Image: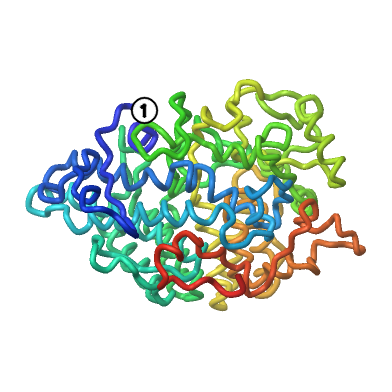
Amino acid sequence: MKNINKIKSPLRMLLLVSMVLISSCSDDVLEQQNDNATSTGNFGTSVDQVKTAINGAFHPITGTFFWGRIVHSGALLRSDEFNVIPFDANTTMSTFQGKPGDRWATEPWQELYKSIARCNNIIINTSKEAITEEDYNSLVGQAYFLRAFDYWYLLNLYGNVPLITDTPDLNNLLVSQAPQEDVWKQIIDDLEKAETMLPESWTGEDLGRVTSGAAIALKGKSYLYMKEWEKAHQTLSTLVGKYALLPAPEFGDNFTETKENNSESVFELQFLGQSNFVWGTDIPQTGTMGNFHIDYAPPAKSPDNGHIVNGWLKTLFEANGDTYRRNETLAYDYPGSTGYGGTDYLIDFEADITIAEEVGVEPIFSRKYAGMDIGTRDQVDLLGTNVGTNWRVIRYSDVLLMLAEALNEDSKTAEAIGYLNMVRQRSGSGLAATTAVFQDEVRQAIIEERAMELAGEGHRYFDLVRWGLADDYLGATSLHVTNGAQLNHPKSISGGTFQEDRDELIWIPNSERDANPNLKQNPNY
């Protein structure tokens, strides 16, 4: 899909349909013609038109203000994997020191609802009569999946959100938040439609578009989060054998630009390094580059100070003798360790090691999504504009571990162990099978396996919250702290700590509440 969401060939005009909150506009402003919009009078009557609209619905998600960068800065870096080095307001959310009005809660909210509005338009207005059934299903099915994806992240980031499945009613823009169970129901309904409408695979220039497997995986993940264990494992089990784990020596291919959309990939967000950089602009051929490089690059390379990986993760890899995954996940002083462009670690990371020592923590750094496969440090743009690595949102290993978890929680522990070991003992790993036997032991083994397999991929914080472990590991009395050494706290550099019954969610943006008084703030903000 490099020429679709990555825009390697010129795209047609994006469909720009979004929900607009109007506070005070003159009639002249309201009557202006929008040359960027497709008329709803004739929309949905051609395949090319709807395909362009689908691309437009994905653009806010891959753009700088959501997955392209901001959701990492604000939300995903909250996990106990990352010891974030403060950088003004940019890091207050990821260090639990933010408050309503701070960055970065507004942009993800707005981008997700922009995408939802575009999906709604596609779902409502695409004509079944004007295009073939196959084209209708493959295009509208993508809109159903993406709307579910949008609401999944709204729900797990903000918790209490409006549920909008229709085109905007200009006479009723002040919507209220919906019960969370209603949002979950909508997510499941949309994914079930997507599952039946989407193909199992795409080829050619469409490679990388959403598949029925992606819809099934996100549905199973949703059931897991809802703690509906039987539905979760029944759903996820249908994907077994439809994908394949890469051999352990090729584990790193899951995070390079050259091995995208491979046999282990269930759903990827498509990115492209681009020279025509316009920060956060929602127009074709801009905004889909890997600006997330800013957040995963080592501190001396990041313009926002970056982070240092916490030592517990290194210890976990080493205790398991897990060198293949460790070497593709972390950069520190182990035999053969390298940095950007294959440069020797101690040479390439000299300045970063100094920074870590100055703030009193062990020098351990992220490899995944840091752009190290692109070239040497001077070849990778400061803002990541030439980083075009797809973000693997759901991998097959994640599916297998979620399946194992759902089975274990449904008291089918013996079955769960088999799927856990499929990941742990992927071809060539050299790792022994888990020694866990009882449900509690297997639960802990799955927690640890997810930490090693999926480190730095945006899952850990959501996992900690749904497991009820966020306060245990990120609170003031973190279990990561040993012998009373506060430097072992995951957020020791900033001094921030997780506050229970608040930080499970991020705040509802003040700007949205100012525009819509019906929106209530999340608890304890």
Question: Going 71% across and 49% down the picture, which residue do you hit?
Answer: 84
Q: Position of residue 239 (x, y in %)?
A: 42, 57
Residue under pointer 1: 8
Q: Position of residue 179 (x, y in %)?
A: 41, 77
**Relative horizontal placement of residue 519, taking residue 466 as reference (left or right):** left
Q: How many marks?
A: 1
Question: Going 87% across and 40% down the picture, which residue do you hit?
Answer: 357
Residue at the extreme left: 129
Q: Is residue 381 above or below residue 147?
A: above
- The quarter of the picture where residue 479 lies is bottom right
* Quarter containing the N terminus: top left
**Relative horizontal placement of residue 108, taking residue 19 as reference (left or right):** right
SS type, badge 1? loop
Task: Please name the colour scheme applied to the rendered image.
Answer: rainbow
Residue 419 appears anywhere in the view: yes
**Relative horizontal placement of residue 402, taking residue 491 as reference (left or right):** left
**Relative horizontal placement of residue 403, taking residue 285 as reference (left or right):** right
Viewer-proximal residue, 118 or 50?
Answer: 118
Residue neighbourhood size for the residue with mark 1, other residues' Cα within 10 Å, grouped as few (<14), some (14–19), many (≥20): some
Residue 422 appears anywhere in the view: no
Q: Is residue 403 above or below residue 6?
A: below
Residue at the extreme right: 483
Give the amino acid type for the residue marked by disc 1 in the picture: Lys
Q: Is residue 377 above or below residue 149?
A: above
- The quarter of the picture where residue 128 lies is bottom left
Viewer-proximal residue, 97 or 301?
Answer: 97
Q: Position of residue 520 (x, y in %)?
A: 47, 73
* Quarter containing the C terminus: bottom right
Q: Position of residue 36 (x, y in %)?
A: 24, 39
